[in-house]
Image (tube, helix red, strand yellow):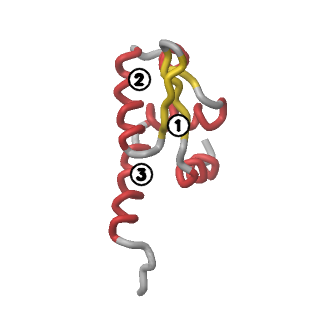
């Protein structure tokens, strides 16, 4: 069996899948893909969770290279910046 993907790429993909393997993070990513960029305030009210909890999940998603953020005034707007992840989410039947 021949694998054309490098070990580093496999590690990167595994880290992305680990980050997505939590219902809240999966919900955040799915929501951002379907509804476009949002700030943490919009997400925490939609998820019915404390803003600090949502922020922790956003940090993990950003660390995994799934999300990017930009500052607009006092707000930080998050969006999905990973085509691999978009493909995964769009292929899920959820």
Q: Residues within 10 Å of mark 3 (few under 14, many from 20)?
A: some
Q: Residues within 10 Å of mark 1 (few under 14, many from 20)?
A: many
- Residue 42: give x, y in percent of width and height: 55, 16
Q: Are marks 2 and 1 in contact (CB under 8 Å)?
A: no
Q: Name which of mark 2 and mark 1 comes first in the sequence.
A: 1
Report the Cα–Cα distance between label 3 and label 2. 19 Å
Distance (Cα) linking label 1 and label 3: 12 Å
Residue sitting at 42 percent across and 80 percent down? 3
Residue 54's tag is 2
Q: CA distance from mark 2 to mark 1?
A: 12 Å
What is the quadrant of residue 10 in the picture? Answer: bottom left
Q: State the SS at label 2.
A: helix
Mark 3 and 2 residues: CB-CB less than 8 Å, in contact? no
Which residue is depicted at the point 58% across and 52% down? Answer: 83
Residue highlighted by disc 1: 29
Q: Which of the numbered marks, if any, corresponds to residue 84?
A: none
**Which corner quadrant holds the C terminus?**
top right
Residues tagged 1 and 3 counted as in contact (Cβ below 8 A) = no
> How far across and down, in percent of the image, does residue 84 sit?
54, 54
Q: Which residue is mark 3?
A: 17
Rendering coords of residue 55 (x, y %): 39, 23
- In depth, the one of 50 and 59 nearer the eye is 59
Mark 1 lies on a secondary structure that is helix
Q: Quadrant of the N terminus?
A: bottom left
Residue that extends furthest to the bottom in the rendered view of this protein:
1
Element type at mark 3: helix
Residue at point 49% right, 31% down? 69
Position above or below: 9 against 62: below
Marks 1 and 3, the one that precedes in the sequence: 3
């Amino acid at each position: 069996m021949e694998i054309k993907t490098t070990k580093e790429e496999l590690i990167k993909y595994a880290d992305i899948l680990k980050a997505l393997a939590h219902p809240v993070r999966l919900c955040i990513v799915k929501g951002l893909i379907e509804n476009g960029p949002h700030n943490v305030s919009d997400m925490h009210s939609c998820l019915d969770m404390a803003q600090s909890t949502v922020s922790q999940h956003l940090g993990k998603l950003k660390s995994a290279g799934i999300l990017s953020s930009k500052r607009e005034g006092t707000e930080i707007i998050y969006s999905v910046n990973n085509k691999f992840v978009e493909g995964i989410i769009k292929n899920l039947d959820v």
